[in-house]
Image (spheres, rainbow, N blue to C red):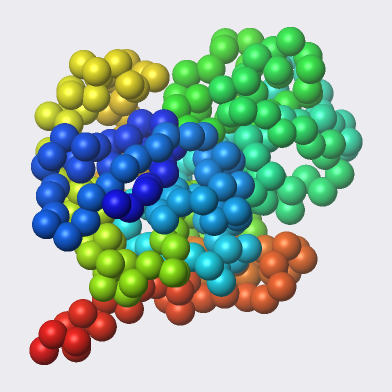
Amino acid sequence: MINLAHSPDADDLFMYYAIVFGWVDSTKLQFSNTAKDIQTLNLATLRGEYDVSAISFALYPLVAQNYTLLRTGVSFGNGYGPKLIKRKDKILKKHFKVALSGEHTTNAMIFKIAYPHARIVYKNFLDIESAVLNGEVDAGVLIHESILNFNENLCVEAEIWDIWQDLSGGNLPLPLGGMALRRSLPLTTAIECEYLLTKAVRIAVQNKAILSQMLLERGIIRVNAEELDTYLNLYANEDSISMNESEIQAVDKLFELGFKAGLYPQILKAQDYFIPTEYKELRFS
């Protein structure tokens, strides 16, 4: 049994639930799944709690010795992403207080590089909007479905996408979330696991309308049908099935920026941390 953890957000549910609904099956592996917010999963991965887990890409260099990076189940922004929001009547000063969704999230890493003097507090992403509205913080970074529909008294101060473009040099998608698999699993098991998860994402994308309706009917999605469609177009699409060259370059750039900011002990190249899927072909050839 492979214990797999994902977030309860629409894109993760969408990409995994083809397995839950029995659309993807295996005679070799079975999965048990847990849904928790992304920062909780980041911390759990640091402790090595799950065989496979959704993580923030910014976390990966801190767990690379114990986890390999999967090519599938990825979420990138392309012209969009998390938003730094504030009340419309608020002017942000140099040392403004801001709520972020977790220390190890990608948006937090990019924010800290761009705003080194901000005073950061960490909150569950569902509580960030209200913390800004009630004045507990001066600003907050909204993620996931929260970017689609926030209070009319709030406005966008900055787009994490725009900050990423400035930091990365432009022309690269914004790497947000990926998946990591425990290195202690047998290699053949790891290869089969990535194969099944990739197949699940592909089937989900190819059957978007049917799967979306099933998720809505079961009441496990936080948004309505229209918002779900918009959100999946952003974060669970053809580019989520398997990382392409541009996405790999973007992850490499994120790791480079983190190293230069003193967050990682060395620069990693994503390609060096993927599962060597060619092993299965060589072994059984």
Q: Return the residue found at the far front.
A: 1
Q: Is any atom of residue 160 visible in this view? A: no
Q: Is any atom of residue 118 visible in this view? A: yes
Where's residue 119, x and y in %?
Answer: 84, 36
Name the image quarter holding residue 209. Answer: top left
Where's residue 90, x and y in %?
Answer: 78, 18
Foreground: 129 or 173? Answer: 129
Question: On the picture, is 249 further left or further right than 24?
Answer: right
Question: On the picture, is 221 further left or further right than 162?
Answer: left
Name the image quarter holding residue 243. Answer: bottom left
Foreground: 51 or 106? Answer: 51
Residue displayed at 88% across by 36% down: 95
Residue displayed at 51% across by 51% down: 49
Q: Tell me if residue 184 comes above or below residue 127 in the rendering.
A: below
Name the image quarter holding residue 68. Answer: bottom left
Where's residue 163, x and y in %?
Answer: 63, 49
Where's residue 234, x and y in %?
Answer: 36, 39
Quadrant in the picture for the C terminus:
bottom left
Residue displayed at 23% across by 65% down: 192
Residue displayed at 44% across by 69% down: 184
